Amino acid sequence: MTLRKVGPSFGRRLAAGWKGGTATLLGAYTILGAMVAYLPISPIVTAGACTLPVAFGILGAFITGRSIAIPPMLIDELSHEGKYSCQPCTSSNLRTACEIVRPIFGPDYVDWEVLEQWRMKNPQGFMEVTNERNELVACFIFEGLQSAFFDQLIRGAVVEAQITGETVLAMRDAKKQQKIYVGGVMVKDPHKYSGARRAQIMLWCMIKYLHHHFDINKTLYALGLNRDSEKLLEALEFSIVTSAANRIDRHNFYELKLSDSIREKILQRVGDLSPCCKISYSSRA
């Protein structure tokens, strides 16, 4: 997120520089009082002696306030995000997500055409998070895979890019599986303050999604594609089930046995975000 600097208002400048303004006011009264003693008495002289010190005092406070204790205020541009919504991912937003992560994942990048095959097989497995302006800010994927292929993926004999539409299970079949694959996790601008907020929203949505679709008798699996993803998995208490040295993709493979306590622990960390995020499990019209 880019933070916008806004200078202090006129009133804040005066409030900060009141001491300097008071000193200027008293000094002006002293000087003008001495000068009046040598000037003929007239309405103009009297008015000037009364009003000029006040004007000088205000000017002194304004100038002093600029340099004392009022740094430019930072306006949080997250306010422009408004409320968030989470729903099954559209084809166009899936393509957008792919373009965002392409430079990050490098050779591990999975083409949009491949992911679209997965999505067509199980549209409910792909979720997007959008802001109030309908801009994509995060997404995630939960998939059930054919058992034989999943076992090879866990061992590291195959890579994520080898998952095909035929390998992916429809949601009704995925719910019957004990193993669930977590992939496609994307947060826009993850290293900015806004990205941290979006990640928090995404985690809340993921927990709500899991509670809606799956019981607690599941084990989640995920690939640590880079250090950022590994830090997130470790923070969520995933553990390595297959080390990078034993895998052809040279990435650690993680697992997490889902439980009510795990869900509650994550929810406690991210807080109740229902006031600022609405989640829907059916596709948008």
Image (cartoon, rainbow, N blue to C red):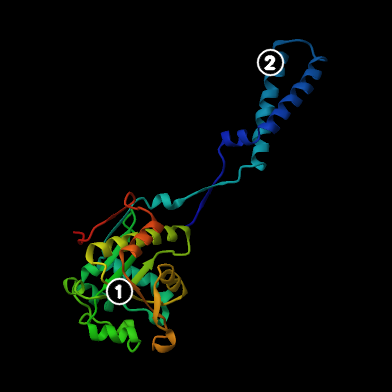
Give the secondary structure at mark 1: strand
Q: Amino acid at mark 1?
A: Thr
Q: Whole-percent x and y of residue 210?
A: 27, 65
Q: Secondary structure at mark 2?
A: helix
Between residues 117 and 174, which one lies in front from this camera angle?
174
Give the camera-side residue of 283 and 178.
178
Q: Which residue is mark 1?
A: 219
Mark 1 or 2 closer to N-term?
Answer: 2
Residue at (61% x, 33% y) in the render: 15
The location of residue 208, given as percent across then percent down, is 29, 60
The 10 Å Cα crowd at callout 2, few under 14, some 14 to 19, many 20 or more, is few
Mark 2 = which residue?
Answer: 47
171 or 135: nearer the viewer: 171
Rendered image quadrant of residue 144: bottom left
Quadrant in the picture for residue 146: bottom left
Task: Judge whether residue 136 can be spotted in this image.
Answer: no
